[in-house]
Amino acid sequence: MNIEEKTEEDSYHKRILGHYKGEKKGSTIVFIGGMHGNEPSGVMALQRVFKHIQRYQPAISGEIYGLLGNLTALKAKKRFISRDLNRLWFVHQVNKLNEGEHNIDEGIVEVREQYELNCIIQQILKKGHGPFYFLDLHTTSANTAPFITVNDTLLNRSFCGNFPLPIILGIEEYLKGPLLSYINELGHVSLAFEAGQHDDPASIEKQEAFIWLSLYFGSVISKKYIPNWKKYWQLLDPVASDQKRFYEIIYRHPVYEHKPFLMRSGYHNFKPIKKGEHLADESNKTIKSPSKGFIFMPLYHNQGNDGFFVIRYVSYFWLRISKFLRKVPTFYLFSILPGIRAFPKEESLLVSMRMARFFTKDTFHLFGYRLIRSWGPVFVFKKRDVPVRTARVSKD
Ligand SMILES: [Zn+2]
């Protein structure tokens, strides 16, 4: 059975919450709600927006899709059943799905969920018109001001910069296998929007605001058709642009099962912290902040491997410098330096520990590389910005 038939039969109708195609050509915007089953606010907001579009029939340039993520987990109101659906999108794994090599009947719920969702995504990419925007709607366990997390590509930066929201760059070095990293590997814009706490009704309103603003910034619907622009803007930016900033992650504190971790009370996203500030306790050890910055995603009442992150503000000056440096063709230039080897097949650079003393992670960031893994004394960096490419789909 080829991918298209499978999609038509099994998942197309139940997984596509809405699909609108305008008469004029334009971008394709794909929203995903419920990638985590205990985060229904994105789905509810998409239903509201689609109801409005259905009723008032605004002029659309391009296409809008609303997709459901983990259907089984949404029904069970759980983050996931067996595996986190948002940690399975490794390029080699998706290529296997596309080529029919993956056994989707091996009994893991999320493998089938991923297969079905991927069928639709591949069809959208194949049949739709670019530019493509993939916007993944999430919420968090603790209360938070809304924010965007995004892989640090120039395309992502320029789209995210439209929103009156804090933007956290460089999440790809800390999360392995989110859908957004896969989409970025294909050269398209993709981001995650975190609206607020899972069950807070205000999160639905903020998701709705984000969806409408995205439709405008993606040039799919003009401003005159957006029902309440001012309200939406203020919902995302209640403090009049005070938090419209780019941040980068500079530290992650890992949590291990054998080391009980207790975050000190009173921390929330974007709270300023000092270097050496006592943030948590771990197996009778005091955990202090390694540097000045802002706290991000402190771990309180949910399980996870991330105790907290420290983020710092990135000035527009540095954003401009790095934008310029990323356009310099550095791949082969770096590879002739001692201690650095190019690995063209993976488009990555292998950097020995000896060289990493002179060329730090920050230097590679500035030139647009991200750390993808370390093998003992060797660090592997990969270029963040890639040209648009199509996924390998052999069965069509
Ligand atoms: Zn989530």
Image (cartoon, helix red, strand yellow):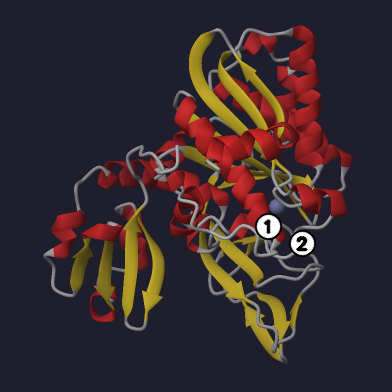
Q: Are marks 2 and 1 in contact (CB under 8 Å)?
A: yes
Disc 2 from disc 1: Cα separation? 7 Å
Foreground residue among 373 and 364: 373
Q: Is residue 379 left or right of residue 27?
A: left
Does residue 160 show up? no
Name the residue type under label 2. Ile
Q: Is residue 259 above or below residue 108?
A: below
Q: Is residue 215 left or right of residue 388?
A: right
Foreground residue among 284 and 38: 38
Q: What residue appears at the point 59 percent right and 77 percent down from the top-left corner?
A: 276
Instruction: Find residue 110 and name its label.
Output: 1
Name the residue type under label 1. Glu
Q: What residue appears at the point 52 percent right and 33 percent down from the top-left corner?
A: 123
Q: Is residue 157 left or right of residue 241?
A: left
Q: What residue appears at the point 80 percent right and 40 percent down from the top-left corner?
A: 41
> x, y percentage for residue 85?
65, 56
Foreground residue among 13 and 274: 13
Of the image marks 2 and 1, the number of the one nearer the N terminus: 2
Task: From the image, tell me which residue sits under label 2.
Answer: 81
Count of numbered circles in the view: 2
